[in-house]
Amino acid sequence: MPSETIDMGTVKTELKPKTAESIWRNLFVRPEMGTFTLLILSIIAGSLLSPYFADLEFILDSSSMFIEYGIAALMLTYVIIAAQIDLSIASNMALSACITAFLFQLGIPMGLALFLGLLTGLFLGWFNGWIVTKFELPPIIVTIGTLALYRGIAMILMGDKSIGRFPDWFVGCDTRYIGSTFIPYPLVIFIILAAILWLILNFTLFGRHVFAIGTNEQAAKYSGIRVKRLKLILFSLSGLFSAFAGIVMMSRLGVVRYDLADGGILDIVTITLLGGVDINGGRGNIGGTVIALFTLIVLRLGLSVANVKIENQLAIIGSLLILSITLSNYI
């Protein structure tokens, strides 16, 4: 097939057709392919450690313990693609869940309490975005501050006590399955949300604007994109998704304390970056985040099967986080 040449004034650009070799090369250098390879290796290693590990029902059923972090990571993917960061997600999960439980304890119907809990998360995310855009402060500094602020408010609200005894229809979402299958509802919710966000990111003007401000914020401004408004929307949605993740965790545990999701930000950021999102913005995809979540699930389950202590698991996850950030600078 002959190549084409386009004469652009004094500049001539030769357009060469894509070959099968170039297509395969582009496929295998994608950042998420390394994560997919790690997923396969983790499954093989886990299967060697225990014959029960290779059971698909066991893996899917155990996924509910991590789905909340996956839900939060979906919107964090958008935030980091836009060259922002939100480190207050786990604290937002805790505070939103605590307020939901506190309102229910006051006698407010559970349905209304859940709605108000989601609004709380939306407001907390908006507050992050408002500070970042209003005062033009680095988001990492702002969200480190609100990380402590939101957790502190949850501690003041709850003290050392826990709240439980929620309605039966709300508790135990992880024990409910689709029909006669062994697919839990939280996993289905995660897949649906991931599919919707994938479509928005790849096929809408909103998604293109997210990539644009992450690639070059100044150029995005000059092209007419309302950068501050878009940042505010992203932080608000991050807060909303965090609150929803906190409520899912609240349903799974059946009880709420101020330390809900304590330390969860490590897993959430690891899922996002391990999925191929560039920490500097401008690159990433929801599919990679989904692969990274299942990689983390399989890895965590494998380490548990191998009786690896929790502190050693944290060291391994932290190493994965450093590795994913390092590789993102070379791919």
Image: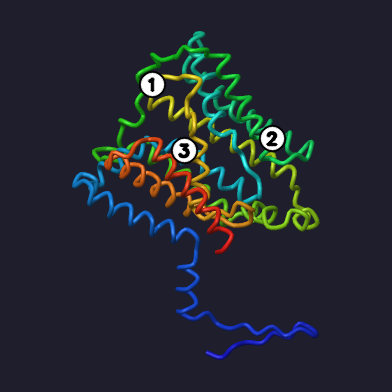
**Label 3 environment density (alpha carbons within 10 Å; few <14, some 14–19, many ≥20):** many
| Residue 140 placement (x, y as % from top left) | 66, 40
Spatial distance from mark 1 to mark 3, Cα to Cα?
17 Å
Spatial distance from mark 3 to mark 2, Cα to Cα?
21 Å
Mark earlier in primary sequence (1, 2): 2
| Helix, strand or loop for disc 3 | helix
Task: Give the quarter of the figure containing the C terminus.
Answer: bottom right
Q: Which residue is mark 3?
A: 69
Residue 112 appears in the rendering: no
Point out which mark residue 254 bears: 1
Q: Residue at x 54, y 36 (%)?
A: 241
Point out which mark residue 199 bears: none
User: Please, is residue 1 above or below residue 250 in the view?
Assistant: below
Hey, what amino acid is under mark 1? Gly
User: Which of the pair 38/315 is nearer the observer?
Assistant: 315
Point out which mark residue 142 bears: 2
Q: Residue at x 54, y 18 (%)?
A: 99
Viewed as shown, does residue 230 lie left or right of 51? right
Hey, what amino acid is under mark 3? Tyr
**Label 2 environment density (alpha carbons within 10 Å; few <14, some 14–19, many ≥20):** some
Q: Name the image quarter holding residue 180.
A: top left
Hey, what amino acid is under mark 2? Val
Q: Name the image quarter holding residue 254.
A: top left
What kind of colouring is applied to the model shown?
Answer: rainbow
User: Please, is residue 147 above or below residue 81 in the view?
Assistant: above
| Residue 167 placement (x, y as % from top left) | 38, 17
| Residue 64 placement (x, y as % from top left) | 36, 36
User: Which of the pair 55/191 is nearer the observer?
Assistant: 55
Spatial distance from mark 1 to mark 2, Cα to Cα?
32 Å
